[in-house]
Image (spheres, rainbow, N blue to C red):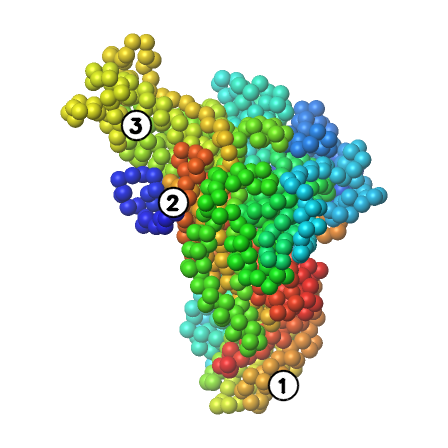
Amino acid sequence: MIPARVEYVAPHSVTEAVGALVEAGEDAKVLAGGQSLLPVLRLRMAYPSVLVDLGRIDGMRGVREEGSSVVVGAMTRHSDVIDDPLVRRYAALLASATATVADPQVRHRGTFGGALAHADPAGDLPAVAVALDAEMVAEGPGGRRTIPASEFFVDYLQTALEPGEILCEVRIPKLDGEWSAHYEKFNRTAQAWAIVGVAAAVRRSNGTIVEARVGLTNMSSTPVRARGVEAALAGASADAATVADAATRAVEGTNPPSDLSGQADYRSHLATVLTRRAVSRAAHIG
Amino acid sequence: MTELLASPPDVDTGQEIGRARRRKEDAKLVNGQTLWTDSINLPGMAHFALLRSPMAHARITSVDVSAARALPGVIAAFSGADLADQLGSLPTAWPVTPEMVSPPHPPLAVDEVRYAGDAVAVVVARDRYTAADALEAISVDYDPLPAVVDLEAALAEGSPLVHADAGTNRCYVWPFAGGDYAAAKAAADVVVRRRFVQQRLLPTAMEPRAVVVDPVAASGEITVYSATQIPHVLRLMLALTIGIPEQKIRVIAPDVGGGFGSKLDVYAEEVIGVVLAQKLGRPVKWTESRSEGYQATIHGRGQIQDIEIAARRDGTILGMSVDLLADMGAYLQLVTAGVPLLGAFMYPAIYKMDAYSFTCTGVFTTKTPTDAYRGAGRPEATYAVERIIDELAHELGRDPVDLRRQNWIRHEEFPYTTIAGLTYDSGNYEAATAKALALFDYDGLRAEQAARRDRNDPVQLGIGVSTFTEMCGLAPSRVLGSLSYGAGGWEAAGIRMLPTGKVEVVTGASAHGQGHETAWSQIAADLLGVPFEDVEVIHGDTQSSPKGMDTYGSRSLVVGGVALHLAAGKVVDKARRIAAHLLEASEDDVQFDKGVFSVKGSPEAKLTIQEVALATFAAHNLPDGMEPSLDSDAVYDPENFSYPHGTHLCAVEVDTETGRSTIRSYVCVDDVGSVINPLIVEGQVHGGLAQGIAQALYEEAAYDADGNLLTGTMADYLLPSAADLPAFVTDRTETPATSNPLGVKGVGEAGTIASTPAVINAIVDALRPFGVNDLAMPATPERVWRALHGGADGGGAR
Ligand SMILES: Cc1cc2nc3c(=O)[nH]c(=O)nc-3n(C[C@H](O)[C@H](O)[C@H](O)COP(=O)(O)OP(=O)(O)OC[C@H]3O[C@@H](n4cnc5c(N)ncnc54)[C@H](O)[C@@H]3O)c2cc1C
């Protein structure tokens, strides 16, 4: 389809970008990798007046280490996240999930920050952010602030970002030592979105699961932290039966959608099966 | 007769036919030097865009284009009523019965829209963006009418009507019978009955449709560039529908990026483009967007099949009856009504039986029109037959391969006239099946299946078999006549020997990805004894290739290739006479081998065909009265269809926890007769398998009860990619066709036809222990999961 006319600016700093957003008012849109925004424009489902492209802001790209956190710039492309040594070492769950996003072309354009700001419950990365207790660092006309992942995803395609605010970077607490992780995605074709996805990180010590983090994709209008599963796994024996038992709690607190790619009851069933698989893979069981 | 052919790529065997040449088309395609219709930009060219109905069915109470007209950059805007007189009605070429209801099909709707996507107004603007903006400035008032979505409900008393004037949603009823099915059924020990649903599919060619019309050629003719499979048919139909004299229309199909039948049509946009270009006196262009195409380009399949098979307890099939409901959509496109009839003759497939009864009812719905899609009628038929044979095998406790073997036509029985009245010239089902079984490790997989069942493995294994044959090489003209089709099925070819000894081959087939330039060059090179590189193949332009019936139905090689064979024979005959004259020998003593004419008994007396070509051009010394040209034209009208066949085997792992089916191995052994280029055959089979598997597992054009297309973008309509498909094991047997001199049978549709039932048979086979005996297509994980939990076919939910 053919998008409607739109102005375009490409500032070189976050401050300039915020300024451009404020100046343009409500109809301005931030453009990151464009992989979600451009289809919306082409289908004429949105008519922004101005696109503020973040692509020329150097400081927003890349991964660095800061104390007990790994900090991922919002404009870091999916393909760079997957290959980043810090991410692989301290946030392996993010690498595992990002590798399942779309196809190589999309991964070379789409960004981590864009995927979070877009807040699509079918997107793979919001559940990871929630599972890893990530913190979103945003800058707006009122300055910088930090929003915990648990408060960032407000509703379907809706975040806690205020108008004029830009997501600058994401701070992910390092999971060091005996953690291992796996993202289990269930989709119908290799490039399709998740019908359900389960992000699991597990700290295992000998025969015991010391601690687990589990996030669910597409089981509500926002990503869901599977606290019940985590509680059932904490300190539990690392065996198949225990994990299967814990996984039955995956549906607690979810409100899965019914749509063309799956009815709610099927999604609930999948959440249980996939949680068992994700945790088992992460914990090297079976 | 049957032998394995496996020559590695590009090995010079001294012969072009049979050589695995890489395609001469490809360098251009992969280097971006292709000339798509959308890449054509002419001086002064304007762009048009169509406003499409968001509703499936509604009365149009008003269309106001004045605001659109007033926008800067807009050249013109018209409602359907504004152009009704000039646009006329789109043609349909296949009135399958004299009583068939064939409602008018205005390219732009005037009073009523009948499917979501039906065009109601058109704007012409300086550029595509302005045109898209202008569409939003048009206001249309609709008075909603009830949608007609379900085929059975459409036929029920009191159903809302798609075409009120017709008084019915029944387009036609087409019965056909061979033998006495009632008697066969009465004599049967076992009767199995099933209902299968052929979901609608969205043809997705790489290149979307596009049209450019240039009204101002120096010679006064109008030139239509279109991403079409059928430049010749389009020219004729434009002449007949718009009334432009045929000689004043030139149609060019530039490089065309796939069609699968979806470009085998005369579309509203082609007619609108011609009318606009003439009216405005300037070139116009339209290119569909993908989501627009999903509504405005024909859909494939769309049938409900009630099939019954009657057999003896010993497995002998006695008869079959088929009752079809075929979804026409809202209007009849070029061959919409006839597509199910191409399947009508194929239900008996490769099997012997004494009785067959068939009825097809065409039904109008408020959905995008259907038309031919890769295989057109034959995949649907093959699916139903191959599925129900599996059900019969299950009922009788027989191995499905064994039951097929018991009933198929044995190779020594060819030629064989089936109960549907077709005469299969040749085939060897035993050989193809034996080879497929060996490659597949059938026995090993059955053992693994048993083991998984025994240990209640959450991942079960299923094995699916499908054989197939198809009538292709469309088509003997007199048969088309007997089916009331509006044209013949011949094909034309021409050869021009140039003074330098190079060769121009003109074909009426219109390649759009198949590789005709390569294959035709190989044939011409062998038959004329010239180097492959010296042959140029000309096609896709009614000016340079004036005569043709175009490309569809696996016909190009089987009909067009044979026409080339005839044309080459004429050139060689004439060249022989000229050579004899020049060599001062008797014509009977001149032999022709690998491009050289020589005189029997005096080996030094010889002339190459290139020398003869030059001598003919000079014309200094030709036999008395001979015309100085070494060109020829031939038109070939086949006497019979051709009947490729094959045996496909598929092993599927079904994860009973999630319902996901994963193809573990896929083996097919196809027999497409003699092979001109094994690489091209392989490519056609691979692509066909992907499309057939896609119908089984992924694709479905889903509509809601209001007639809205729910899968209107590629985000919702799931197309598999290479990542979703297994590595195919393909092989061939070669049983040459006896009905044409090249021995060829056609390969364009083979893979699509057999793969769909092979996959579904495999999934059902995996799930038999769970009481599952059918699955609705596509067999999504959710459907499989529901079937496992409900023991039904999982058809209820998607
Ligand atoms: C074919 C296809 C398949 C896909 N499949 C998947 C998949 O399987 N899983 C998956 O997770 N994703 C998938 N995606 C989406 C992909 O991951 C996108 O890249 C991502 O959702 C958006 O990132 P982007 O950088 O492209 O953002 P954009 O499209 O540029 O922006 C998306 C939205 O976020 C806003 N935004 C972007 N960056 C910021 C910021 N820094 N601050 C504030 N607002 C911002 C924009 O204004 C816009 O509203 C797919 C996309 C495509 C095209």
Q: Quadrant of residue B68?
A: top right
| Disc number for residue B502 | 3
Report x, y in % for residue B172.
72, 36
Query: Are labels 2 and 1 on one chain?
Result: no
According to the picture, the residue beneath numbered tag 2 turns out to be: B1
Residue at point 41% right, 41% down?
B736
Residue at point 53% right, 38% down?
B423
Closer to viewer: mark 1 or mark 3: 3
Q: Is residue A130 left or right of residue B641?
A: right
* Element type where label 1 sits in the image: helix
Q: Residues within 10 Å of mark 1 (few under 14, many from 20)?
A: some
According to the picture, the residue beneath numbered tag 1 turns out to be: A231
Closer to viewer: mark 3 or mark 2: 2
Q: Is residue B789 left or right of residue B737?
A: right
Q: Chain of mark 3?
A: B
Q: Residues within 10 Å of mark 2 (few under 14, many from 20)?
A: few
Check disc 3 and give the amino acid type. Answer: Lys
Q: CA distance from mark 1 to mark 3?
A: 80 Å
Report x, y in % for residue B56.
73, 44
Is residue A270 visible in the rendered image? The answer is yes
Q: CA distance from mark 2 to mark 1?
A: 70 Å
Callout count:
3
Q: Earlier in the sequence, mark 3 or mark 2?
A: 2
Q: CA distance from mark 3 to mark 2?
A: 35 Å
Check disc 2 and give the amino acid type. Answer: Met
